[in-house]
Image: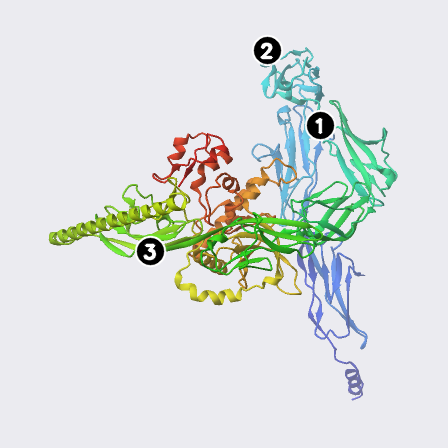
Amino acid sequence: MPVLCFLLPIVILVPAASFSFTKEPKSQDALHGRSAMLRCEVNDPQGVIYSWKHNGEKVTDSERRFLEGGNLKFTAIDRTLDSGNFQCFASKNSTGEEYHTGETSFNIKWLESGMVSLKSPESEAEIQSSSQVVLQCNIDGHPRPTNRWHKDGALLSEKSYKINNKDRTLTLLNASPDDNGVYYCCAKNAVGHACSNDNFTLNIIDKSFPQPVVKPDDLVVMRNEEALFHCQFTAEPLPTIEWYHENEPVANKSRYYTLIQFANGSLLITQVKQRNTGLYKCVAQGPRGPPVSLEASLRIAEIEEMMPKQSRVFTADSLEQVTCRVPHGHPEPEVWWEHAGQRVPAEGRVHQDGLDLIFWPIRGEDSGTYTCFAQNKAGQRKQELTVTVATKPEWIQKPTDSQLEEGHAGYLHCHTLATPEPEVTWYRNMQPISDVRFKLFSNGTLRINNVEVYDGHLYSCESKTEAGKLNAQARVYVLERLKFTPTPQAYQCLELNKEGHLQCSAKGQQTPTIRWLRTDGSDIPAWVEQKGGTLHFSTVTRADAGNYTCLASNSQQGEIRAVVQLTVAVYVAFKLKPENMTVYQGHTAVLHCQATGDPPPFIQWKKKDKFLEADKSRFQKMPNGSLVVHDVSTEDTGSYTCIAGNSCNIAHTSAELYVVDDEKTPYKMIQTIGLSVGAAVAYIIIVLGLMFYCKQRRNAKRVQKGQDGDERELECLNGDVQQNGHTTAEIQEEVALTNMAASGINKRHSSHDKLHFPRNNLHTITTLGKGEFGEVLLAKAKAAEDEEETVVLVKSLQARDEQMQLDFRRECDMFAKLSHANLARLLGICREVEPHYMILEYTDMGDLKQYLRVSKSKDEKVKVQPLSTKQKVSVCLQVARGMEHLSNQRFVHKDLAARNCLISSKRQIKVSALGLSKDVYNRYILQRLPFIKFTNKTWSYAFLFCETQKENLYAALSHSSCSGVLPKGQSSHHKSALYSQSSKAIPKFKL
């Protein structure tokens, strides 16, 4: 009973453990140098502190071995440091409990390379021929590795050699020179594979084997110098020595160059050439053993040229470094820097570091010439470097606001001083200037050749060097010259007995006074009213014809004049229009057309877009203007247009001809023939009657003019009026760029209203030339008060002809529907008063033909940079894109030429329809054909001979060859005073 009472308190005092191990470390395999981990975890880690002991010593954390939670982590197992037992301890301070796991260890596997050593005999000197040689492989590891032996890379087998894997040895029982070579061993176990890191070379000397005494050296010699290779071997008996050059015996090459081989084995080359260079071998052969060869190379000394002079600009107080490019050479050249005849030191503010010349920091006095030298046996090369320390520009003369006169040269100055010479750049409205009219001089002055009104802008210049830059601005105000806006057309027509106007406007620094005068000095009739530069004819009479002068003047700039030759005419009207008709194939078709006018109109026929060669082939034009088509075919089906015109206007009318196959019965054929014959007889009777009537009328006029003292006049059935047997004018139409249908006329007004532009916001700058509708102007347009003015192109409608007005409206409609980067865009229309204006996009370089001519000019003042091949391809591509867009919109241009393409300073092309050839390029022709009165249509082939004389395009052709290109019956010699204006080689003709 007492014993039980004693034991009970003991049981009650022992508390239960508050934690226990859930994971304990276990012994495991590990590889030397690899990572590993011993795990140690408890079920309640809160407040538990872990520690480890290794062989009874506490483990401290290091980069290779450290605690991670309760685990002990090894980044790289070490077979020496990590051998032994590890034990994990876990303690809790709050309860004072501490527990530990059982001991555990690593089974570390490793493999360590070693050398191949000589085990027997003790030294290499004791190795004799026919003696026993034992080699030891010192590669060790755990588990024990298996070994293999190699000689000169070949595996040795246990059948031929005595190999002891236990002792890791290789035994050569009877070593001889045949066993010479490099021996090494390799071993492997579970860790991996390793070979010996230091091999053993067995070299048993056999006196009969050649042994090198003197080895040849690599040689570098100058061209034509001698080269001597030394080569000596020893053996018993003496070996034979033979030299090889590029694996060929030198004895075979002795006929190409001089070679001398001495008895001691040396080789002498007396004059080294390029063909002597290469690899030489000295080969010795003894009575026994393999041949022994020694190699040496021969090269000719050389050194490349260095780069030419170079210049560098640096900013003061900065770190700068310049590297000298070493030229290729043999032997390797020595390189150094010099300045002012002295070598640059290796230390200091300016010093040489290897190939680099270093300035730290660079200063103004460091400016000058530095030379890099490279030298070897072949010679010396050098490269000069000019160093400039840049300074910030300082003003000498700033640009100031200037007033420049239009049409004269203007100058803006921007003079600065700096080292080196500063680079000056000019800007107009913050954009770099690229216009060919501007020239920049080396001192920074900007010259504007031929100042234009639109040159009035804000200009700024920038002068800069590596050290800094300066900026300044100035505004240019252009003083406009007195000029017409636009110049009145030199030849104008007004319709008889109708109301008419002659327009004249001008501008200058002061608003000019404009008035009209008779050129011959006579007074302008009282019924003709002058108002604001407009000469108003309430009813045009024959007496109003003649020359008029528009005079514009102001007090500052004087006066300017423009002469207008006014012609009073009766506009063309059709008496008989062609009608649609259907004709059987093989029959004859007659399309009637007669027109009246004064001067009498000239009639031509056109099928689709091609003029017919009347009186030729199956087509015949009758004297009264009718068209006869003989033996018609289905190809003749289509629209035929009768064009009638005189020197003042042109009119046209069309009819459709349908040709059908004749598949009727013979009776129908006879009936058709009968009707045709009857119609032909009736037509002949009508023609004869008209001829008789015309003859009587001419006789009556001749008698009347004879009584009045006037010249006799002959009038033909076709409406042509002849004077002295020759017609006074002829017409050929140039169809404008359009294919608009007549059904769209009613829709034009709404689209035109959207494009309406106030004439007051349009200010004319200058006249570019004359187009098909009138003058083409350069103007400034301002869409709103708060917007800047834009330079635009303006085409004016100065003809009162209805057809011209219709063509003008059609062209406006066409441009309004087109939108493409390579097509001129319609910006607006002015229809408030006459003349009407069409406002188009403007390109600052003008039309492409004018640009190409200027680029070929020999005048350096106006010449522009010619187009490169890449730019020419770009121009063609842009024109093609614009024409493709026209085609996609179902438009036909009909007059694609360089004169109708605009080019900008950025070489952007826009296809347009300026028609400036009427004035700009045909002015030479117009001056030499004063007897012809022109309308606004182009007569291209009518002036072929004069164009030939001007541009010399067909100089090799005879007059008869040139005449052959004109339609028969449409050319005739003109006996006039033209022979006095040009060479007799130019035939005078008219159409």
Rendered view: 708 above or below 537: above
Answer few, some or many: residues within 10 Å of disc 2's Cα (few below 14, many 20 plus, some between 14 and 19). Answer: few
Label 1 sits on residue: 305
- Badge 1 crowding class, 10 Å Cα cut-off, few under 14, some 14 to 19, many 20 or more, is some
Residue 83 in the image: above or below residue 52: above
The x and y percentages for residue 842 are 58, 53
Between the C-alphas of marks 3 and 2, the distance is: 109 Å
Whichever of labels 2 and 1 marks the residue nearer the N terminus, that label is: 2
Q: SS for tag 3?
A: strand
- Labels 2 & 1 near each other (Cβ < 8 A): no
Point out the frontmost of discs 1 and 3. 3
Amino acid marked by disc 1: Glu
| Residue 635, visible in the rendered structure | no
Residue type at mark 2 is Arg
The location of residue 957, given as percent across then percent down, is: 43, 30
Q: Which residue is mark 3?
A: 575
The percent coordinates of residue 820 (x first, y second) are: 51, 56
> Callout 2: helix, strand or loop?
loop
**In the visual, does 668 lie left or right of 76?**
left
Crowd tier of the residue under label 3, counting other residues whose Cα lies within 10 Å: few below 14, some 14–19, many 20 or above: few
Quarter holding the N terminus is bottom right
**Image side of residue 615 versus residue 875, left or right:** left
Q: Nearer the viewer, residue 334 or 444?
A: 444
State how many labels appear: 3
Query: SS of the residue at dot 1?
Result: loop
Task: State the residue position of label 2.
Answer: 255
